[in-house]
Image (spheres, rainbow, N blue to C red):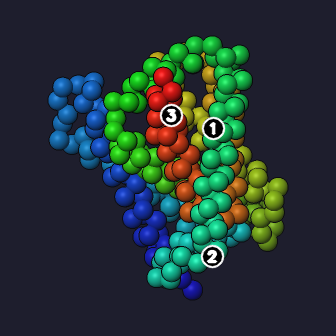
Amino acid sequence: MRPRWKTFFALATLAAFASLSSVPLEIAALSEVQSHVPWWAPVIAFAFGFVPSVIAVALGIGTLPATNFDLPIIKRLVDRQPVTGVAMRSILIRSVLFAVAGFVLVRVFSVWIEPLLVPTLAETARDQSRDTNTFSSLQLTLLSFAAGVREELVFRFGLMTLFTWIGIKLFAIPKANSLLIWTANLCAVIPFALVHSINAIGLGIPVTPGLIAVILLSNGAVGLLFGWLYARYGLVAAMTAHTVYDFIQFVIWPGLAESAL
């Protein structure tokens, strides 16, 4: 039996790399609002992402054995087995395709629903796009990787696994069925979507019921997609899709919009 501490160490190491990846952009953003950045700012920025991720890893490691969830790629890495097989490539390719499809659907949804619920959001989005252009493509790529890894550790591997485990214990069933998995997925998506409302507050967008509805629907939809990928193909599939989705959102889409002007 594979020692749990090896899986914990592997995921904690991944969380550390992800947390380090977001530090350059966070410090660059801080330097734009204050002239002097204290020496301890990178440490705080790293800890802010790393600590919740490691707590989530511990939760996931403790509750995973009772669920139907698996970590096929992580297991291969821990066991020092190749991850270049057809099955592994299939998982990654599907994750990328689902991320692209999810982004297209969310953009179509946004064009239709945002003007109805939050008329001022389009103008704010243009301002945000101009602000994003102050960061390099490398910084935004690293941010995409950081968000894809840390948020999947927290909301899917940590919370979704925990909620599934609670359901198994609560209803005294031998393993999770589809209804329980989707219920756990939805329960994990709600805080995932609400956390993204912090971005709106940071941008100075007035928090209205319409804005909350847009955030819940758009982020909730992709969150459910990531949760399904986690349950179906494993954690790396969800991380890959999330990273690709954010890369399209932060790097590719603004680049296409700028070139069209």
Task: Tell me the distance, in whole angstroms, between the alpha carbons under discs 1 and 2.
Answer: 31 Å
- Where residue 115 sits in the image (x, y, percent)? 67, 17
- Is 252 left or right of 209, judged from the image as shown? left
Give above or below for 157 relative to 84: above
Q: Is residue 44 visible?
A: no
| Residue marked by disc 1 | 219
Task: Tell me the distance, in whole angstroms, between the alpha carbons under discs 3 and 1.
Answer: 22 Å
Q: Are marks 3 and 2 in contact (CB under 8 Å)?
A: no
Residue at image coords 32%, 45%:
23
Residue closer to the observer: 42 or 97:
97
- Where residue 146 sits in the image (x, y, percent)? 43, 50
Residue closer to the observer: 172 or 96:
96
- Is 187 left or right of 43, judged from the image as shown? right
Give above or below for 172 relative to 118: below
Residue at image coords 46%, 40%:
251
- Where residue 252 sits in the image (x, y, percent)? 49, 40
Of the residues shown, which amino acid type is indicated by label 1? Asn
Where disc 3 sits, the SS reads: helix
| Residue marked by disc 3 | 256
Task: Answer with the quarter of the image where residue 35 lies.
Answer: top left
Q: Are marks 1 and 2 in contact (CB under 8 Å)?
A: no
- Is 179 left or right of 131, judged from the image as shown? right
Of the residues shown, which amino acid type is indicated by label 2? Val
Q: Are marks 3 and 1 in contact (CB under 8 Å)?
A: no
> How many residues crowd mark 2 within 10 Å: few (<14), some (14–19), many (20+)?
few
Of the residues shown, which amino acid type is indicated by label 3? Leu
| Residue marked by disc 2 | 86
